[in-house]
Image: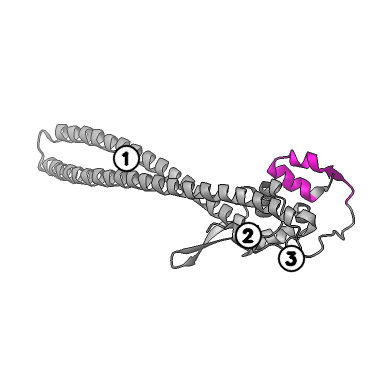
Amino acid sequence: MAITKEQLDGLKPEGFDETQWSEVSSKFMALHDSDVNGLVTNEANLKAEKVAIKEKYDSLNNSFTAEKNAWAEKEKALNANLEELNKKINDGSSNAQALELAFQQKEKILTDAYAQQKGELEKKIQKLTGQVTTLEKSAFENECKDAFSKAIVGKNLDSNNLEAIKTLALGENFSKFSKKSIGDGKFIITRDDGKDIAASVDEFISSSAGKLFVLNGNSGGGADGGNDNPPPATTMKWADFQRLSPSEQAEAALKYTLVD
């Protein structure tokens, strides 16, 4: 569900500077609206593409089933011919060996043709299965992005570094999470320890690394964001930190103290 400007303003911490709140909330709504519009478009495209792939998959699967049934009938006929040949052999027919050889040659031709067609159909089905897996992965990431957008509302986070916050708190491409069934066709997205995306975001911004991304050291609850931990032995300039990739930022935030 999209977040309105009025809902966001209702979460403004008491005593928060109006000018700063206007700037922060405007940036957040711009990013949020962009994400929501993108998610709606992506979801519609994914649904249409998934339906098309499912129809193609069903068509190929039906063709494969029809081919398999047809070959079953041919196999039945071949077995009948084999019984007839065996009968002639047992009867001492002078043409039994020639007939048996002809049957074996014909059987090999039919068996090879069937194996080739079966292999081609199985390759097509495997390709479609891979496309469905890719679509499901994309849909999962979109659900996670939507949950992340909702989880950061009112947290007073640095809007210029939301991508880094997402990676640090939730893992590269949400690698810390998976979709789990809770029965009745319903699913939830959690870590192995049961924490969902909202709880994971709260956990991160309460850590020493996460507080670096909270404006004025305040995550929205009015608490002092001061760091009581002793300073580490090494530091990194904020400008240098922003030039790192998300995965490098994740490592640097835990290893260095960021300074101006």
The disc, 3 or 1, on the residue closer to the chain's N-terminal end is: 3
Region in magenta: 232-254
- Which residue occupies the foreground of this view, 136 or 198? 198
Residue 229 in picture, x, y percent from top left: 87, 59
Q: Which residue is mark 1?
A: 118
Which numbered disc, 2 or 1, marks the residue closer to the eye?
2
Q: Which residue is mark 3?
A: 14
Q: Quadrant of residue 105?
A: top left
Relative to residue 199, is residue 181 drawn left or right?
Answer: left
Compared to residue 202, the image places residue 139 above or below, namely above
Q: Secondary structure at mark 2?
A: helix
- Which residue occupies the foreground of this view, 77 or 93? 77
The image's colour scheme reads one colour
Q: Secondary structure at mark 1?
A: helix
Neighbour tally class for label 2: few under 14, some 14-19, many 20 plus, Cα within 10 Å: some
- Which residue occupies the foreground of this view, 151 or 79? 151
The disc, 2 or 1, on the residue closer to the chain's N-terminal end is: 2
Q: Quadrant of residue 242?
A: top right
| Amino acid of disc 2 | Leu
Neighbour tally class for label 1: few under 14, some 14-19, many 20 plus, Cα within 10 Å: some
Q: Which residue is mark 2?
A: 8
Identified at 77% across, 49% down, the residue is 253
Relative to residue 198, is residue 14 drawn left or right?
Answer: right
Q: Secondary structure at mark 3?
A: loop
